[in-house]
Amino acid sequence: MTATAPATKANLIDGAVVRREARAGARLLDKAFALAFKGLVYAQIWEDPVADMEALALDADSRILTIASGGCNALSYLTANPASVTVVDLNTAHVALNKLKHVAIRELTTYAELRRFIAEADHPSNVAIYRERLAPHLDETTRRYWEGRDLVGRRRIRAFTRGIYKQGLLGGFIGAAHMIARLYRLDPAEILGAESVEEQRRLFDERFAPVFERRLVRWLTNHPASLFGLGIPPAQYDALGGEQRMADVLRARLEKLACGFPVNDNYFAWQAFSRGYGRTCEAPLPPYLQRDNIQAVRDRLERVQVEHANFTETVRASDHGAFDRFILLDAQDWMSDTQLTDLWHEMTRVAAPGARVLFRTAAEPSLLPGRVPDAILDCWHYREDESRRATEADRSSIYGGVHLYVRKG
């Protein structure tokens, strides 16, 4: 999600996504994705913060720089009591969502109110709560966003009365997947009733796996645009597929989501299979929304700074030692070799010995060797064992690899 040269806010996403060196047809697909990505993509981030916090070894001295996405992980990192969390994103909608969640956590002081607004996010009273208790505390830009109208003329804040997790590119993609499942008489929520991982496995093998052999599913997934809803740009589509048929890749990722972890401890599974969090007290939630963590998150909220900015440019403008934890999500899958080199040059300059960089890739291997000069990578140690453990622990299950690099010195 970075660009190699300073960009205006109007073209941040174009600068990150559109491959100038690509053929005309590929550039056209890139531009289509960039247009789609300018709206809300992720109401919930799809990287597991528990796996992140373990790999990052967060402590009271940690100074984090991360990409915002849906904002869940930046808030969840507060449970580890870091010194600071700087959150950047190219997407105006994501910045507005992060800021709204922060105000809700600060102003909605009873757990029931906060859960109704952020976790359930579909109650008719949420518009009144926004108007009376949240809007007065928002900056003008964020308030204009939520009180503005979407493409069909509805005020954006009303998404919190329809289910915010059903909205955006990802919410629409999951909704479309549910529609296709119903064509084949499959209710995805079936798997959430399983009482054991063994039962989850049986249901997946008998009910879910055969859908990926259907001609319609194979045809749809053969087109890069079909995965825009997952936030996967055309450049990442190629890396995700590799030499395999895309339907087979998606089946393998869904299999891990459905069978790799108990569903009663995996809120990503609930989002995928029911299009929202569970409603019972025992239902899994991101760390920042768990009742036992809310007060600590609220008390530490002032440590979080949210900016509509480019990751590389933020690092470039920072002094040595300003950050010691860098979380790139899957943004590097979007980048050219030049962009990757620029990013790692700046992180190497800023990072003190022991600083950690965590990122995800659509494919399994790290994408850095052979693309970033050895002179830069030689300053970093790739933690292979910790990367493998983080990949295995990531309950979101949609990435091929989670990778950890530690600054030498």
Image (cartoon, rainbow, N blue to C red):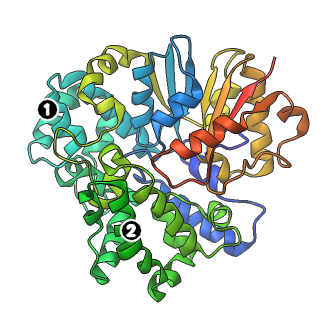
- Quarter holding the C terminus? top right
Please say whether residue 298 is visible from this viewpoint: yes
The secondary element bearing badge 1 is classed as helix
- Quarter holding the N terminus? top right
* x and y, in percent, of residue 274 in the image: 27, 59
Measure the C-alpha gap from mark 1 to mark 2. Answer: 36 Å
Position of residue 393 in the picture relative to residue 118 (left or right)? right
Q: Quadrant of residue 146?
A: top left
Instruction: Name the amino acid, label 1.
Output: Glu
Position of residue 262 in the picture relative to residue 37 (left or right)? left
**In the foreground, 200 or 395:** 200
**In the foreground, 180 or 343:** 180
* x and y, in percent, of residue 105 in the image: 26, 26
Q: Which residue is mark 1?
A: 113
Q: Is residue 231 above or below residue 139?
A: below
Instruction: Name the amino acid, label 2.
Output: Phe
The secondary element bearing badge 2 is classed as helix
Q: Which mark is residue 204?
A: 2
* x and y, in percent, of residue 151 in the image: 32, 62
Residue at 52 percent of width and 25 percent of height: 86
